[in-house]
Amino acid sequence: MQGKLKKLWLRIVLFIAGFAGVFIFLYPFVTKGIKNIGNLTGVVLGICLILYAAWFHRVNCRVKKWLTRTTGKVICGIVLLIVLVAVGFAAAGTICMVRASKTAPKDETVMIVLGCGVNGDRPSLMLTERLDAAYDYLNTHEEVVGILSGGQGKGENISEAECMYRYLTEKGIAKERLYKEERSTSTRENLLYSKKIMEEEHLDFRVIIVTNEFHEYRASVIAEHTGITPSAVCGKTAWWLLPTYYLRELYGIVFEWIF
């Protein structure tokens, strides 16, 4: 009887976790139209948990039968290995993200604000989070200049750099302290083209990178590859966006490690 109750509770927990995962990862898509590999992965994992909970006994019995055969043991071993490797990569990536986001600025005089989506001519929520963090730092460190990095993408009436420039100057940051980099379409290009501005203006290569906390690690790795020494000022990501972009970023980190 006690064993049956434990299995029942486990199924209930799996159902709750599955439905919660589907909701959390679908919410950005339903409310903001955000779709990427992050929320796709989250939804798929949530559905897998729901299906496992629904066919709990059948799946467990099937696995037990497989484990009595050599082929089944090999398949289960491969699946387990894949899961362990994925969990290991996720854990390592998470540690790297947290550490990079805690790399506080010291005496840097240059800031690079990495672009993000623009809705028409207004900053998206995530870009606003970065801009608010940049404004707070620029407002209290008047010796720091900012490079606003981001080109113009689909659905954007102006470049991301121009959008950031308008946002910060409207809040009182002097125009003379801001440079616009309007060609980039990726994080790597953000930093490469920003470095060219730094070379032209004879700016220090020790730089504060402003982006969302989950993105700081990958941005810092790319920065170091381009000869920039990074520190971090992070925009605080909305809770309902963080899971989706966290998973998406894990894919980016693994890609960066491999290639």
Image: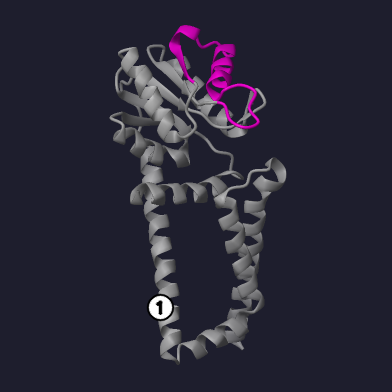
Q: Amino acid at mark 1?
A: Gly
Residue at point 64%, 43% (across, down): 34
Q: Residues in magenta?
A: 152-181
Picture layout, residue 76 above or below residue 22:
below
Question: Is 182 on the left or on the right of 47, as rendered?
Answer: left
User: Could you tell me which quadrant the N terminus lies in?
Assistant: bottom right
Residue 189 shows in this picture = yes
Picture layout, residue 103 above or below residue 66:
above
How is the rendered protein coloured? one colour
Q: How many marks?
A: 1
Residue at point 34%, 25% (across, down): 207
Toward which corner of the image does residue 163 lie, by quadrant? top right
Q: Regarding mark 1 in the picture, which secondary structure is present there? A: helix
Residue at point 40%, 78% (across, down): 77
Dot 1 alpha-carbon crowd within 10 angstroms: few under 14, some 14 to 19, many 20 or more: few
Residue 109 shows in this picture = no
Which residue of the protein is positioned furthest toward the right in this rendering? 30
Q: Does residue 165 show up magenta in the picture? A: yes
Q: Tell me residue 72's x, y (percent).
A: 46, 85
Question: Is 52 on the left or on the right of 184, as rendered?
Answer: right
Q: Tell me residue 11's x, y (percent).
A: 62, 74
Instruction: Give the camera-side residue of 107 and 65.
Output: 65
Q: Tell me residue 257's x, y (percent).
A: 34, 49
Q: Which residue is mark 1?
A: 77
Picture layout, residue 36 above or below residue 228:
below
Toward which corner of the image does residue 116 lie, by quadrant? top right
Residue at point 46%, 38% (across, down): 213
Q: Does residue 212 show up magenta in the picture? A: no
Q: Tell me residue 192's x, y (percent).
A: 37, 28
